[in-house]
Image (cartoon, helix red, strand yellow):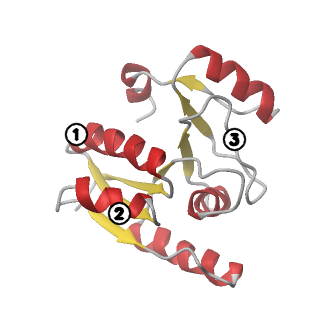
């Protein structure tokens, strides 16, 4: 019986790709996680180069013209991977894979994190926010809390010791 925690990572842009590589390497050292990654270009090109072969990495095209098909595809993907947690980058001001996965996870009661690589950057892409932002410093945390106006937003200064307590 496999009692490992299933972590799903996603990335769209290069900065997110670099950020999640560091997080994946952190979690990979722990033997209690199954790690899966789903990405789109340009992050996918970076991740193909840096991820080890033992990490499940799925690359998709993000040129879905039908939003419902895109959401259904990603929902099936999450179900197939039996994801317990989602960790995404932040893709910018529009709707992308990261925001779609956050939207789906919210519906499925899967806890979601977004790694914020730009101070105060949040994205309401599909009308929901992640459960927790991983931010780089106290200023970012303060700005994110102010912008999101979400009572249950738990912005944290990203320190591995604090992050460990989440898992």
Residue depicted at x 43% and y 28%: 163
Horizontally, is 49 left or right of 98 in the view?
A: left
In the picture as drawn, the residue positioned furthest to the right comes out as 149
**Residue neighbourhood size for the residue with mark 3, other residues' Cα within 10 Å, grouped as few (<14), some (14–19), many (≥20):** many
Q: Nearer the viewer, mark 2 or mark 3?
A: 2
Residue under the image location 59 percent in, 34 percent down: 118
Question: Distance of mark 2 from mark 3, alpha carbons?
Answer: 24 Å
Tag 1, which secondary structure? loop
Give the residue number, with chain letter if any, for mark 2. Answer: 45
Does residue 86 lie above or below 119 as drawn? below
- Disc 2 vs disc 3: Cβ atoms closer than 8 Å? no
User: Counting other residues with Cα less than 10 Å from the Cα at mark 2, is it few (<14), some (14-19), or many (20 or more)?
Assistant: some
Q: Residue furthest top?
A: 138
Which quadrant of the figure contains the N terminus?
bottom left
Distance between the alpha carbons at the discs numbered 1 and 2: 26 Å
Q: Tell me residue 76's x, y (percent).
A: 51, 77
- The residue identified by callout 3 is 122
The one of 33 and 23 positioned closer to us in this rendering: 23
Residue 30, label in figure: 1
The kind of secondary structure element at disc 3 is: loop
Q: CA distance from mark 3 to mark 1?
A: 29 Å
Specify whether residue 150 is in view.
Answer: no
- The numbered mark, 3 or 1, whose residue comes first in the sequence reads 1
């Amino acid at each position: 019986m496999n009692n490992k925690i299933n972590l799903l990572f996603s990335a769209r842009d290069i900065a997110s790709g670099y950020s999640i590589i560091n997080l994946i390497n952190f979690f990979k050292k722990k033997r209690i996680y199954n790690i899966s990654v789903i990405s789109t270009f340009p992050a996918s090109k970076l991740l193909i180069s840096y991820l080890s072969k033992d990490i499940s990495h799925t690359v998709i095209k993000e040129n879905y013209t039908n939003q419902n098909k895109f959401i259904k595809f990603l929902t099936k993907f999450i179900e197939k991977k039996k994801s317990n947690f989602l960790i995404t980058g932040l893709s910018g001001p529009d709707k992308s894979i990261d925001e779609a996965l956050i939207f789906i996870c919210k519906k499925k009661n899967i806890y979601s994190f977004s790694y914020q690589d730009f101070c105060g950057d949040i994205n309401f892409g599909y009308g929901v926010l992640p459960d927790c932002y991983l931010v780089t410093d106290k200023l970012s945390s303060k700005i994110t809390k102010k912008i999101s106006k979400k009572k249950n937003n738990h912005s944290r200064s990203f320190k591995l010791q604090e992050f460990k307590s989440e898992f």
